């Protein structure tokens, strides 16, 4: 919880691998084994974060291509590939903010859930359009408060509501906008728990429901039969009291089916959730090799 947001988690992991490589003073053999150990540790640190895995894979691919080089060159290659990924991620953010802000109508009211840096960038960019934002609290960790504070500090009119008031307020908004932790091959989106309820309410009220996510959040493994794992967090986040025979469940994310998603705003444009597989197979060619 010290690092929140799918994007920030991925960036922190890449920076860590870059700084490990830069400071390494041992032999090539021990470097390769340490790098593998560390990248595996980070790869598996958060189960529902494909951007983290895609970033590490990006660096591993550069390493594999240059495995015969000497240690000093390998260290440079790792540093450069990590920095390249971070730069691509930064450029993607800027582009999504631009595309997302264009998509937001003038004088509109937007309901959001949780705290997504991607979403924050879009809303701040659309500030001049005279928009207002309704944030859900996002139990149990109240990341909605972070969004509400950040946006009101940026000068946007913001209202915060409890999660269960979602349906009552959805009739008053023009659209719903959420971030994503993972986008699956069938177009389903994994995001903070409660997202799929908002999508359901939006569907019922005929309000557009949009997701913003860079294509680095697309999980190519889901096209190969792996199911996205929903991280289950500490029950104490829900209720600090320990009561005998009481079970507490605390899934961090839920899955919103593509039927409830109007579009996904990405750095390569606004796409239908039903086009995710096509984009994946283009963006991750090394995973989709023909047998
Ligand atoms: P960015 C957050 O979850 C939220 O679910 C948010 O919508 C999503 O990550 C994407 O955030 P968590 O990873 O990458 O903090 O857009 O549990 O910042």
Image: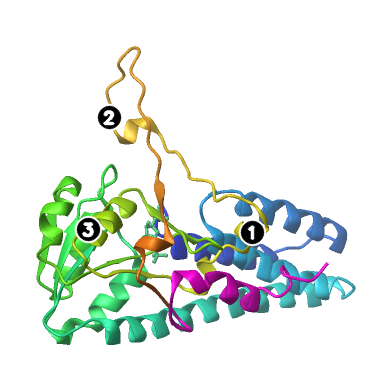
Per the image, label 2 sits on a secondary structure element best described as loop
Question: Between residues 204 and 53, which one lies in front from this camera angle?
Answer: 204
Residue 1 appears in the figure: no
Mark 3, residue position: 204
Q: Quadrant of residue 69?
A: bottom right
Gap between marks 3 and 2 measured at Cα: 31 Å
Query: Which is more N-terminal, label 1 or label 2?
Result: 1
Stretch of the chain drawn in magenta: 266-291
In which quadrant is the C terminus drawn? bottom right
Q: Residue at x 29, y 71 (%)?
A: 120
Judge: label 1 CB < 8 Å from ligand 1: no
Image spot of residue 260 (x, y percent): 35, 61
Q: CA distance from mark 2 to mark 1?
A: 34 Å
Splitting the image into four quadrants, where does ligand 1 fall? bottom left
Q: Earlier in the sequence, mark 3 or mark 2?
A: 3
* Residue behind mark 1: 221
């Amino acid at each position: 919880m010290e690092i929140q947001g799918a994007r920030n988690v991925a960036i922190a992991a890449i920076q860590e691998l870059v700084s490990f490589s830069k400071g390494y003073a041992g032999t090539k053999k021990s470097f390769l084994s340490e790098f593998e150990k560390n990248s595996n540790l980070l790869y598996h640190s958060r189960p529902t974060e494909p951007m983290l895995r895609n970033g590490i894979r990006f660096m591993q691919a550069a390493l594999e291509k240059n495995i015969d080089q000497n240690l000093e060159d390998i260290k440079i290659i790792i540093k450069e590939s990590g920095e390249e990924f971070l730069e691509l991620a930064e450029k993607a953010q800027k582009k999504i903010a631009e595309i997302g802000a264009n998509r937001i109508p003038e004088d509109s009211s937007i309901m959001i859930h949780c705290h997504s840096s991607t979403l924050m960038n879009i809303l701040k960019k659309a500030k001049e359009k005279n928009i207002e934002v309704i944030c859900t609290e996002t139990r149990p960790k109240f990341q909605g408060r972070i969004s509400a504070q950040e946006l009101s500090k940026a000068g946007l009119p913001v209202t915060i509501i409890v999660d269960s008031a979602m349906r009552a307020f959805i009739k008053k908004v023009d659209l719903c906008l959420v971030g994503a932790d993972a986008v699956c091959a069938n177009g389903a989106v994994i995001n903070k728990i409660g997202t799929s309820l908002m999508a359901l309410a939006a569907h019922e009220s005929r309000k557009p429901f949009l997701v913003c996510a860079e294509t680095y959040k697309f999980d190519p493994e889901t096209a190969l039969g792996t199911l996205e794992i929903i991280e289950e967090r500490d029950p104490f986040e829900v209720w600090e009291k320990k009561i005998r025979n009481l079970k507490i469940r605390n899934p961090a994310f839920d899955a919103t089916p593509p039927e409830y998603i109007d579009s996904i705003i990405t750095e390569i444009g606004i796409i239908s959730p039903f086009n995710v597989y096509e984009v994946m197979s283009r963006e991750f060619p090394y995973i989709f090799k023909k047998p």
